[in-house]
Amino acid sequence: MKKIIYFSISVFLLCSCTTPQLYSWGKYQTTSYNYLKNNDEKSTKELVKTYQNIIDKQTGTRRVVPPGVYADYGFLLLQINKSTEGKKMLAKEIELYPESKVFIDRILKKLEK
Amino acid sequence: MKKITIFFVIIATAFTSCTTTKPILKTVAYKGIYSEKPLSILVMPPINKTTAVDAKEYFHSTLNIPLANAGFYVIPPYLSMEILKKESAYDGELFINAPLTKFGEIFGADMVLFTIINKWDKTYGYVSVGVEYVIKSTKTNEILYSRKGTINYSTSVSNTGGGLVGALVSVAATAINTAATKYVDVARVCNGYTLSDLPLGKYAPVNPKESEEFAGKNEFNVTLNSKYGY
């Protein structure tokens, strides 16, 4: 019983102090879920908006766009036929995270074909 | 008298040594991560052993945030999902025991995360989920991180109205809440708990006390609520 109380208290403490995170993700959780579930025009638009918001208003402690956001945003833009913008975003991912070069270059090459 | 005391001490030590497992330092439990210093991680589609059909993709979509927030480079989830599907590799089962060098070459991944959903039971007031997380190195194929357990996610709605009617209302609300509980909410709580032990990656500020921290249990059974998510 004591253990349970102790555990509940520690869980409560963990939740009550919100530690600052490296990145802010805006509404990503919800819009990403809706996009996966519905995959329609409305959910796509909302996900585009979310990505744009993560990029423009980054409030995480690193103050940079989180890993994968430029790339996945670019990929989404490519799917809605905004290929110039999409490719630009993919290039930004490499610029910010050079470790993504191996993978993203492969994608960019495939697009050139 | 002395003999009895010594005897008692021995018995006591014997007892404690059986019941409590010694905590292990993170630097020992996850020594591969400290020596390899991996930077990038590819999230594989979860291995779904339950009959809950949608669990796989919804679980998949929740894994990038906790890993990125822990300081790692997460290979773009949607883009990698697409490539895996195109290459008919959208199956964690195929690779969990296979050499992972190719994932290093194609995705530039230092590590690969496999997740296994073993159980997904909804009962009144709870969703009980059995999960397993295994992170393997693409360089050595060794397991770098592994935790497994049951998370009982509380979906109970507290009684706010008071009295008998209030209690009945909260019982009904709890039942509805359990039924409507989304995979993603539960997945988030599972990820938040299971990955909280992960040593920090390159992009996270160095935690000077990390080398003194003890690793969490690699097998667990816990009850949590939605506040544990992220």
Image (cartoon, grey):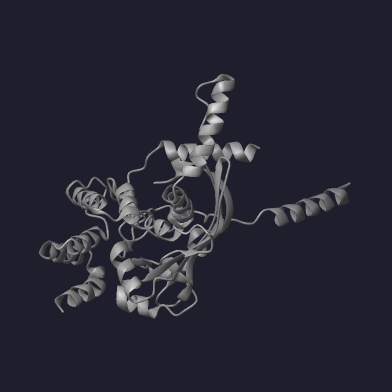
For the C terminus of chain A, the quadrant is bottom left
Judge whether A59 appears above or below B30 on screen.
above
x, y percentage for residue B59? 42, 57
Residue lying at 40% horizontally and 67% vertically, measured from the top left? B44
Residue furthest out toward the right: B1
Report the residue at 41% width, 77% height from top: B100
Q: Nearer the viewer, residue B176 or B150?
A: B176
Residue at the image position 76 percent from the left and 53 percent from the top: B15
Q: In the rendered view, would you say B21 is above or below B181?
A: below
x and y, in percent, of residue A59 in the image: 24, 45
- Image quadrant in which you'd find residue A68: bottom left
Residue B55 seen by the camera: yes
Task: Kindly identify the residue that appears in the image at 32 percent across and 53 percent down.
Answer: A38
B15 to the left or right of B175: right
Q: Position of residue B56 (x, y in %)?
A: 44, 61
Q: Position of residue A76 (x, y in %)?
A: 22, 60
Q: How many marks?
A: 0
Residue placed most toward the observer, B216 or A68:
A68
Residue A63 visible in the shown view: no
| Rendered image quadrant of residue A94 | bottom left
Viewer-nearest residue: B24 or B178: B178
- Please state, as top left, top right, bottom left or bottom right, where the N terminus of chain A lies in the image: top right
Name the outermost residue toward the left: A84
